[in-house]
Amino acid sequence: MRLPMITLPTRPKRPPEDSIELRAWVLAAILVGEVAVLTSGYFDVATAVLAPLLTVAAFIVSYYRRREKNYLIKTLLAFGALAALAMFFREILSSLYDTRVPLARLFVWVQVLHSFDLPARKDLTYSLVSGLILISAGAVLSTSLWYGLFVLAFLVCALGALAQMNLSEARERSGTGTSRSRGLAWGVVLPGFLAVVAVGMLFFALLPQRQNMNLSMMPTSAFENLRGNFTGGVDNPYYKPPPGGDPFTGPPQAISPDSYHGFNPYMDLRSRGRLSDEIVMKVRSEEPVPYRGVVFDEYNGKGWELSADDEELETLTSDGPRFDMYSSRNVGPAQGSSRQVAQVYYVERDASNVIFGAYTPETIFFPTSTIKADEYGSLRAPYRIPEGSTYSVISQVPDNSPEQLREASTAYPDGIVEKYTELPPEGLDRTRALARKLTANTTNPYDAVVKMNDYLRKEYAYDLSIPPQRAKMDSVEYFLFEEQRGYCEQFSSSLAVMARSLGIPARLTTGYVSGEYNPFTGLYEVKASDAHAWVEVYFPGQGWATFDPTPGFDSTPWQYEAAGNLQGGKVFGFLAERTGEALAPAVGATGTLMRGVARLSPKSIIIAGALFGGISLLIAYSKKHLIRQKVSPDQRSVKVSDARIYSRYGEIAAALEEAGIPRDPHETPEEYARRYADELGNPELARLGEIYLYARFRDAVPVDLAKEFDNLEPRLLEAIERMKAPEPANR
Amino acid sequence: MKRFIKPAFLAVLGGLLYLIATSSGAGWLYVVAAAIGATVLISALVPLWNVRNIEVARRAPTVGTSGTPLPCSAEIHNTGWLARHMLEIKDDFAGDTGSGIVTRLRRGGSESFDYTIENPRRGIYAGGEVTVESGAPFGLFFGRSRRHVPSNVVVYPRTFEVSALPRPEIASAGSVENETKSLRRGAGGEFWGVREYRPGDPARLIAWRRSASSLSSGRLTVIEMSQEQDSPLILSLNLDHRAPRTVLEMEISAAASLMMRALKEGREVVADAGPQRIPFPENLDPDSLLTWCAGLEPSRAPELAASVEILPSLNGVRTSGTDTIILVSCADFAGPGVWMTKEEEREFVERMDAGGRRAVVLGPDVREPWSLS
């Protein structure tokens, strides 16, 4: 039996790449890619430092050994690649629900290993592609606008590498050697980069951007097996428990600007403050839905409370991070039509233990083995959710049409009537009367709720600056008939109370509105000030439907605006607004203008930009044309000093002619000056001709030349006089 | 096709990242995909503009030799509004290509660079096509513009040292040593003939009596004298267009080498290169001879009639039928082929013989001491 012969290559297949510049561009691109991934917050410091350092070392090694066969290095690299693969599989098996980080780690180490063997240009090309994969992996991991800097830096380096590669190939084709390519960075890479950024922005704006997600593997933070008991009550780190346990006995609590007071087991309607504009979470969502947090069912005249005890919360357990709500006894069967909306939450600030999710959460991916759900479909984590956490929710959002709700029966289940139509026995007479008055002509609960909803939106002003409630009266009555302006909780409470007064089941819900969409990250940025309250009304057979009576807000499911596929079209408005905000302190007027522009549709911005650009070009062209005419030599105005020198030089020429040194027709002024200077015996006098030429053909004569002329002129005239004088008698 | 691999790969990669973005909802991936799209688009458009408004002038020697590097230089001038970058210039000139790179050519600026046509091919050239190509900025696509740039150059055939000229010997005739010499027009003492006076003829050669007899015609007649000289070197080249180009070049090189040697020895030289031959120069010197060789093109095989006509074109060589025509054949250099077969060569020789002139084939029929080194 003959064994197959194995032959090792005797020489490299491809010629080694000698250009250090090309290697530097590629290295820079790879380093940017690595740093972009390693600073995403998922990697330890050791990896973040070691990987880039090893890459630099690898590039140096591969440059110096580019002509060698490198059998040993290749063997070691093969073992290294196997080790990285083993590490990847081990990691991925422990975290099946989020493969992004293990994949990114694998890419980083493969890149580091590959960098040790880059002899030829083609290897560098593969490395560049690998860098592109790294920056793409970072793009999946990143939730920050700052990631744009990495993208831009990578673009500069990658374009530089491509340009340098093109030059190296051209040199190879033409047989010219490797030399430094001066001007490539400024002449090719920079203009190319700017052009790519400009065109890329346009592409990005026009690119259909679907927000689909892989629903079987939604991202979460690292899983923790927490099976310990916890109450499941709302736990907000920004609010201390009220003294005595009842928050409504004393004056209203101070409102923390960092967290909404509605993310508590109670909500006081008597005071409100402004919440900060700090981003509390970023949400990747298929639709701009409101993120529901806490549901209140008990109104006490001063605010809202949860009637259910913590013991009544249901504990959901799982071996992994996935929780399916259909198995929960707390969540009733889905009623009416609905549509699926998936969301991923990236927590940016330490928060309460409330797990947010669009109503109704169906599947939750949370990185613990236990969560709790109350009877309203609200969710609680076993701990205060820290900054940097990630969890996902797949919801079935009610999709009932107004017609369906209008046709719903009024045969409410007893449990619903008992729980959601209860009101304080006193203090709400005027409210009840108003509700009856507003709905006098309506024939069904839906129309009645819409009537009251519209009334509140039209007749009352949204105002966050109102003082705390002064009068000792029902908070809803105070808002409706005394203050007549206020905040979302007051609007929503009023609607809920009026609906209850008519026997329509209603409850108050708090959460966040969808937030501002960032077209670059594809995330909705939710600020603390985006906290909101709205109303859920029950319709038999259709379930709970959302109503939002606060002017300027709309959380009604059938009025959600579909995200659409051209989210990138918001990029110009987004950039203009952000730039406007950044510049506002310095140039307020410009900032205001830019914010105004940002409110225009992208189409209007493009048309306005084209008009502005066209007019600017026209002005620039006309100006250039006019200036060219103005400075034409024929029309150049003569400076006073020039004219003075002309006339004086004319007199000098006349004197020379009289003295017998006329200018020959073929002589240039300089030749003539040299000749008369020679004949007069003083070569310095030739300078007069040069100064005359300066005045005649160039710009205004400088002061020092004019002085020199003043100095030389009398000497020349003296010389002429001496020449004209009769010779001494003794000669 | 190979050049499309890189942009196609990049476009596919961009599409793939876009698809991943649609399923992962990662906004930055859309940005990366858009940047890739923009890079491909700009790479496709800029080269087209980059090669516009570029003027090229070539400086080249007027004479060169086949196979000997021809040093040239090109001056590139940018008449466009903006600077141009990464221009590759390819000059298809004198049968080969020279190339150079201009990394940056500023607006209104000029740049010169030297290059070499490494292997010029024999011929008479009035210019060549210059291709200005650019892959700027990123080398994914290439823009190209071609223009004819005039400059005259004559590339002589390559000639070799010839140790001796062929001595034609015909077996049947035995040694014909003395037949290599014959009487020709010259400065000898024997009468050759008369002809009409041409300006510059010495007055002592005017045949006064004969001129007087034809006085009415107003023409003078001069006497021509004769001189014994070596017999002329007469070549008939078979430049059959079906023969490989390299064979034809070898043939022409051999013929040129022989003729140059003959010219050096002071012998008359005449050659025929087939039915489409260009006229053989009358006033022969090395330059005119090599220029004639440079201009030779493949043609049909030599015809008997055409080759017979060589003799009258000798312009004054008195041969008395003893001069031998040497056939330089393709078969001798390339072996048997579709061109003139050995039988046709033999027929050619026999028919020449039948016409009263001797003909031999350069290879087998012409023995040493001729040789090419």
Image (cartoon, coloured by chain):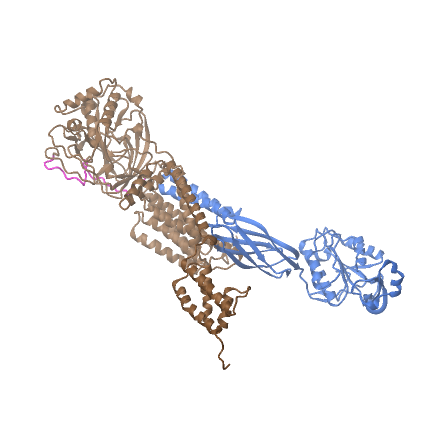
Chain colours: A brown, B blue
Classify residue A480 by image quadrant.
Answer: top left
As drawn, A547 above or below A215: above
Determine if residue A3 is in view. Answer: no
Across and down, in percent, residue A258 comes to: 21, 41
Q: As rendered, which of A483 and A211 lies closer to the eye?
A: A483
- Left or right of B300? Residue A81 is left
Classify residue B291 by image quadrant.
Answer: bottom right
- Left or right of A116? Residue A289 is left
Q: As rendered, which of A99 and A71 lies closer to the eye?
A: A99
Determine if residue A168 is in view. Answer: yes
Q: As rendered, which of A65 and A322 lies closer to the eye?
A: A65
- Left or right of B230? Residue A382 is left
Across and down, in percent, residue A438 comes to: 21, 21
Q: Is residue A241 magenta?
A: yes
- Left or right of A496? Residue A639 is right
In this picture, which residue range is highlighted in magenta? A219-245
As drawn, A89 above or below B293: above
* Helix, strand or loop for the magenta stretch, by majority: loop
Across and down, in percent, residue A250 comes to: 10, 34
Across and down, in percent, residue A491 comes to: 21, 29
